């Protein structure tokens, strides 16, 4: 029988460009969770079966990836960042966050990343058809799936705060919260 994680693990998924990596970096910094960017792991550890020329990305060897991650995930305290979530063991995660973004916002973000047109269109279509959200609902218990909007910096601030609250973390004040507001002269 496979071991259960000893600490909380969170999956952050969503269409490319929804802000997964930015959210995970901030949340890891404020929570102490370990940020695991799956794309980076796949590249650094050679956990792929080749290169997809049309989509300009590696084809992930899902079994090898899960084997490589097992020990780390069982230790717990991980924040996993990837656009796909259906091949990870369900027992690994206590919360699955699906980031969503407005199509116009997403288009701009992917365009700035210089995505090839085919890849850009496929990702916009995936967001419209809620592919990541449906995948999360089909792969995990509905009670642990949390959908969050991720269009603006304010959305990201709210999402970090909401996830810190979920993690039961004491909220470290952001610089602007400690600053005194100047009063207007009457």
Image (tube, grey):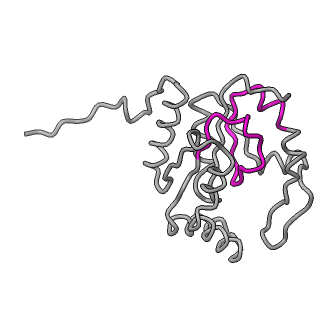
Q: x and y percent of residue 70 in the render?
A: 83, 34
| Image point (78%, 49%), residue name | 87
Q: x and y percent of residue 168 in the render?
A: 52, 25
Image height of 179 relative to 155, above or below: above
Q: Quadrant of the C terminus?
A: top left
| Image point (63%, 61%), residue name | 131
Residue 182 horizontal side relative to residue 40, left or right? left
Q: x and y percent of residue 177 in the render?
A: 37, 32
Question: Which residue is at the front of the view, 100 or 92?
Answer: 92
Write down the region rendered in magenta.
Answer: 69-97
Image height of 40 relative to 3, above or below: below
Q: Is residue 71 magenta?
A: yes
Q: Is residue 11 magenta?
A: no
Q: x and y percent of residue 71 in the render?
A: 84, 30
Residue 104 horizontal side relative to residue 7, left or right? left
**What is the residue that sits farthest to the bottom in this orientation?**
117
Question: Which residue is at the front of the view, 92 or 168?
Answer: 92
Question: Which residue is at the front of the view, 85 or 48?
Answer: 85
Q: Quadrant of the N terminus?
A: top right
Image height of 122 relative to 19, above or below: below
| Image point (68%, 77%), residue name | 117
On the image, which quarter does residue 185 sit in? Answer: top left
Image mark count: 0
Residue 104 horizontal side relative to residue 72, left or right? left
């Amino acid at each position: 029988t496979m071991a259960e994680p000893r600490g909380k693990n969170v999956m952050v998924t969503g269409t490319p460009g929804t802000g997964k990596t930015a959210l995970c970096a901030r949340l890891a910094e404020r929570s102490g969770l370990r940020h695991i960017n799956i794309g980076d792991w796949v590249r650094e550890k050679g956990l792929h079966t080749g290169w997809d020329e049309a989509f300009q990305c590696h084809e992930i060897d899902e079994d090898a990836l899960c084997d490589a991650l097992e020990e780390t995930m069982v230790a717990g305290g991980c924040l996993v960042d990837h656009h796909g979530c259906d091949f990870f063991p369900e027992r690994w995660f206590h919360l699955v966050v699906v980031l969503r973004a407005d199509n116009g916002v997403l288009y701009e973000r992917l365009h700035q990343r210089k995505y090839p047109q085919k890849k850009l269109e496929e990702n916009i279509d995936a967001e419209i058809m809620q592919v990541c959200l449906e995948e999360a609902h089909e792969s995990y218990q509905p009670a642990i799936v949390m959908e969050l909007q991720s269009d603006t910096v304010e959305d990201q601030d709210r999402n970090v705060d909401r996830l810190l609250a979920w993690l039961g973390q004491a909220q470290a004040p952001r610089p602007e919260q400690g600053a005194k507001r100047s009063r207007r002269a009457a």
